[in-house]
Image (tube, rainbow, N blue to C red):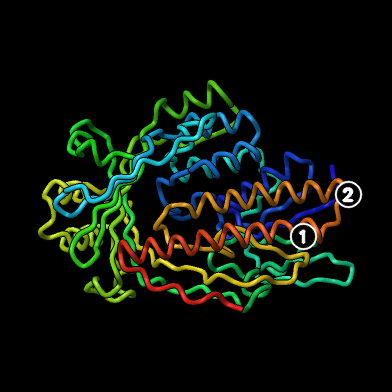
Amino acid sequence: MSDLHVIIAGGGLGGLALAQGLHRAGIGVTVYEKDPTPAFRNQGYRIRINADGITALRAVLAPEAFEVFAATAGVPGSRMDTFDHHLALRHAQDLPRVAGLPGGGHLAVNRNTLRQILLSGLDEVVHFGARVTGYTTDPAGTVTTHLTDGSSATGDILVGAAGVNSAVRQQHLPQAQVIDAGLRLLYGKIPFADNETRAAVPPELLSLWTTVVGPGRRFVGLAPVQYREPIDRVTARLAPSIALSADSDYLTCVFGARREQFPSTDEELFAMSGAELRALTVSLLQGWDPRLVDIVSCQDPASIFAVSVRTSVPLAAWDTSSVTLLGDAIHVMSPAIGIGANTALRDAQILTGRLTEAAAGRPLPEALRDYEEAMRGYGFDAVRESAVHGRQLVGQDLLPVASA
């Protein structure tokens, strides 16, 4: 076991992936997560894991946990098509496949299933109901993390990984901006509990990701999660020690539009029930292909929730210290190209590698500087690419010039 100890503020996908990598490397790690339990709130449904994400998970997870991840992931192919609201194909895209990776580098996973895999083996590492409010550093270079209950913990490095509202980022980089991207999304899921519902969805809408764009740049995004084997059978076969919740096939359904397209204020929108949000969505799809309206109408009302899309503004280099950042805490982006989670997983893989080098004797400031330089490059490139695509397709606000 290394003498190095890392504190992670936030137990989302990126923070947990980092904890897995460090734990496997014999580096002391503690995660503080504000939610009281892993299942406290809805954190979304299907997410796309691309080659970067798969490679990162292979690097940080124990082999048996990675096998469970691969076996519980759907393999919907590599097509990402765009249709108009009459379901006429506007743009067809077939992404390159990567040899040697499950699904050719294109997987569709249930977010909660992946999070449970990332939590496996970390019972003594992850502390729930523990919100980080800030930190102090001392001349020796260590950092003390402060929690809402008045307690504190000291380590060699603090990693802010608590997402877009990260208190660590707000203290460490007060100049970093997170802005409203001008879009509102309504997430829901359509259970494939019976073959009739599944059969009602045209096969061309069951690829890796499908976007349907209509008048006013309103859009519907569709993406399936279809298991190749029952989850309990996967864990029994590959890793009985990993406990996963049961799940069944479903279709993720996302309705989105400019905030001005919604007849309600944000306050009203976020106070609506799932049934009200579904009715609102259907009302905003008048004149669209009836097949699509029928699909949207099949959403489980209990599954629907609203999201305000926010994005970071790319930031110039900052001085490296014993505090660093990961994932949405530093480079939150719109979901326009679907790589936010993959970018966070990539952060975790690279930071694990640099901290492993530091544990073996490399100067810690040098190791962290290398991580931050790499992360700023690909992370903010992803922010810019997401903003450009989101603006072209659905009218996302123009991304401001990078902060100094």
The spot of residue 49 in percent (x, y) is 48, 43
**Residue nearer the viewer, 170 or 82:** 82
Q: Is residue 129 visible?
A: no
Horizontally, is 44 left or right of 56 in the view? left
**Residue nearer the viewer, 51 or 289:** 51
Label 2 sits on what residue type?
Gly
Residue at the disc numbered 2:
361
Q: Residue at x 58, y 49 (%)?
A: 345
Residue at the disc numbered 1:
157
Instruction: Answer with the quarter of the image where residue 261 lies.
Output: bottom left
Instruction: Answer with the quarter of the image where residue 77 lies.
Output: top left
Instruction: Answer with the quarter of the image where residue 173 lies.
Output: bottom right
Horizontally, is 227 left or right of 324 in the view? left
Label 1 sits on what residue type?
Ile
Which badge, 2 or 1, comes first in the chain's sequence? Answer: 1
Horizontally, is 290 left or right of 183 in the view? left
The N terminus sits in image quarter? top right
Q: Is residue 322 above or below residue 90?
A: below
